[in-house]
Amino acid sequence: MRLYTYFRSSAAFRVRIALNLKGIAWTPVFVHLAKGEHRGAPYNEINPQGLVPALEDDGRLLTQSLAILEYLEETRPQPPLLPSDAAGRARVRSLALLVACEIHPLNNLRVLEYLRRALGQSEAQVNAWYCHWIADGLARLEAALARGGTGRFCHGDTPTIADCCLVPQVFNAQRFRCDTAPYPTVMRIFAECMRLEAFERAQPARQPDAE
């Protein structure tokens, strides 16, 4: 497997965690987002979406992090990252989507660059935007985790796709110095995840392309 990745991409971070949890050997191919390497050739010839991650597996190219996580679960089911029951799977997917579709899109690189360049926002204003949507999203995630089913991790006592999404989002919140104290369940789960080598090895600072 070849994973097109960037050390600070939270979407690529999700996939790195899942690959590590499943014990899948993979080779990184670095795409430097801050330098714009995702916008043109040769990367756009590989992935016309111009986004990371992308995963090559046996001649197939897969894109979009949640689709990749589901593909890994279906093709390499052990250890499982989704519960065995339908209700549990729906809950895990709901938590993962809350992060990936409700929090992350408002704060990804494209949005922040538009705020800076097109709208002329200062770094302080960009950071205020970022932390506002982090606070809004993590509050909703905290409430969802309080509704039952949460154990050591987002769902039960083993990591799931939801944890693969939660951890990178908390890393981003910490990077932008957002206040995470109001979300004790989120932060407890984050700490529990980071005790596992699969999560620690996937973190941005441990990547060869880290600056």
Image: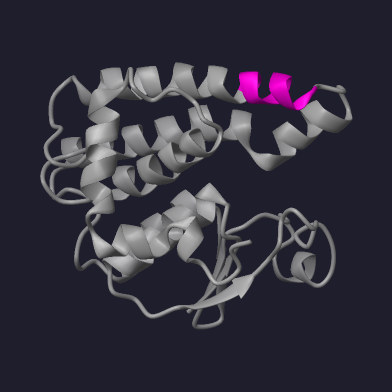
The residue drawn where x is 34% and y is 76% is: 24
Image coordinates of residue 185 in percent, x first then y, are 23, 27
Name the residue located 41 percent from the left edge and 62 percent from the top edge. Answer: 202
Q: Is residue 50 left or right of residue 156?
A: right
Q: How far across and down, in percent of the image, does residue 178 sit?
A: 49, 26
Instruction: Between residue 110 and residue 84, name the one nearer to us.
Output: 110
Our reading of the magenta stretch's main secondary structure is helix
| Residue 112: percent from left, percent from top | 72, 33
Give the extent of the magenta segment: 122-129
Residue 175 in view, yes or no: yes
Q: Is residue 137 above or below residue 190?
A: above
* Looking at the image, residue 56 lies above or below residue 31: below
Left or right placement of residue 21 versus residue 151 in this view: right
Q: Is residue 188 left or right of residue 48?
A: left
Closer-to-camera residue (90/21): 21
127 drawn magenta = yes
Q: Residue at x 62, y 57 (%)?
A: 52
